[in-house]
Amino acid sequence: MSRAGDWASAPIGDWLALILAPRVGPRTFARLVEGFGSPSAVLAAGEARLDQLGLKPETIAALRQPDRALIDAILTWAEHPDAHLITLADPRYPPRLAEIADPPPVLYARGDADLLSEPQIAIVGTRNPTPGGGEITASFARWLAGQGLIVTSGLAVGIDGAAHAAALETGHSIAVLGTGPDRVYPAVHRDLARRLVERGVMVSELPPGQGPLASSFPRRNRLISGLSLGVLVTEAALKSGSLITARMALEQGREVFAIPGSIRNPLSRGCHALIREGAKLVEEPEEILAELAPQLRAELAAADRSAPGARRAAAPPPELPPEQARLLQSLGHDPVNLDELTERTGLAVEQISSMLLLMELEGHVSCLPGGRYIRAP
């Protein structure tokens, strides 16, 4: 959907009136707004014109007489300090999500909404993980969040909950809900939801008051993948929502990672199927960061272009951990490539790549054409 035109300045109440009408999903919303120019123009259209577009009578009736009580209730909810209504016209709308085929016209969020636009890795899997699967999930989530990636998942029990909880120990996490933003499902995650609002964000395309419906969770999965640079599946059966999320990620052009397991573990079969279909087999979290490095560098460059001088004005970079300090020393003062650094340090290429990316983000090194690196001036 183009962001040009009068629709971008339409009142938020008109956005809600349109998206809350029965049978108006993201694609119908986009078709109507593109045809009329704005949500307000759709609401002002005559019944005959709306009927010509193939809208059902109940949809037309709702557009002619929106549920103002419901709209007012949502607007009242949005007045809470941690609540946010974000439309496609809002600069806070996450750019990666706006790229998918059917982005939600309105997002309802609680917490730090700015995190929605930060680089994210989705971690998903079974609701009934093995003890080993839960430990591996927590280990990956804890490390990746500690490196600055936002860990995104769906707040379900099992792998989702383990990923959220571990990520909050070292960084931030995003929960994509299959209910309204004011509901916690499952209820066992009430305390986790509270921590997510404090140190992350919970987001939904469903309005406040909407309870759990079976049809809502597959829709939620496309948002988990759409928000993220990539999706990691740690344990999953052959027929599971996690595999749906992973395949949606492939359709959206996202990276997909899978952790292999025992051939005797039925919860490894989903991961093995994804690997056969082209997902990247990973054994260490550093491999994910190294794979995402080109995208992260592109985002860093874009941020530099949009805010010239911002990095120069930032606080001095923190002291390097011992391994990164040793790698920086190995760089010397002339450009070197990964093979040379491997020979000098004895470290694996994947480990060097992930450390170089972190050091680049912190301003210690610069990446030159041809995959060579040099100390930053």
Image (spheres, rainbow, N blue to C red):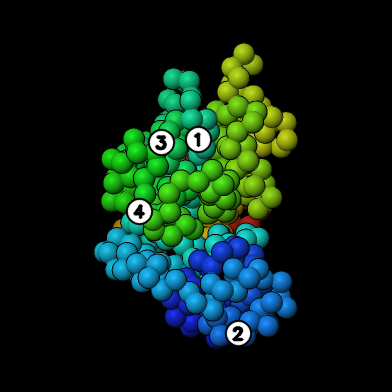
State the residue in front, 50 or 323.
50
Question: Which quadrant is the C terminus positioned in?
Answer: bottom left
User: What amino acid type should be assigned to the residue bearing mark 3?
Assistant: Gly
- Mark 4 and mark 1 lie on one chain; the one further toward the N terminus is 4
- Mark 1 and mark 3 lie on one chain; the one further toward the N terminus is 3
Q: Which residue is label 2 attached to?
A: 45
Local packing at callout 2 (Cα closer than 10 Å; few below 14, some 14-19, many 20+) is some
Q: Which residue is label 3 attached to?
A: 161
Q: Is residue 369 rendered to the left or right of residue 187?
A: right
State the residue in front, 68 or 242.
68
Question: Mark 2–mark 4 contact, CB under 8 Å?
Answer: no
Residue sitting at x 71%, y 37%: 278
User: What amino acid type should be assigned to the residue bearing mark 4?
Assistant: Asp
Determine the CA span between mark 2 and mark 4.
33 Å
Q: Which residue is label 4 attached to?
A: 182
Label disc, if present, on residue 285 of the rendered structure? 1
Helix, strand or loop under label 4: loop
Determine the CA span between mark 4 and mark 1.
33 Å
Q: Nearer the viewer, mark 1 or mark 2?
A: 2
Determine the CA span between mark 1 and mark 2.
53 Å
State the residue in front, 81 or 354.
81
Determine the CA span between mark 4 and mark 3.
18 Å
Figure check: 351 above or below 216: above
State the residue in front, 327 or 73.
73
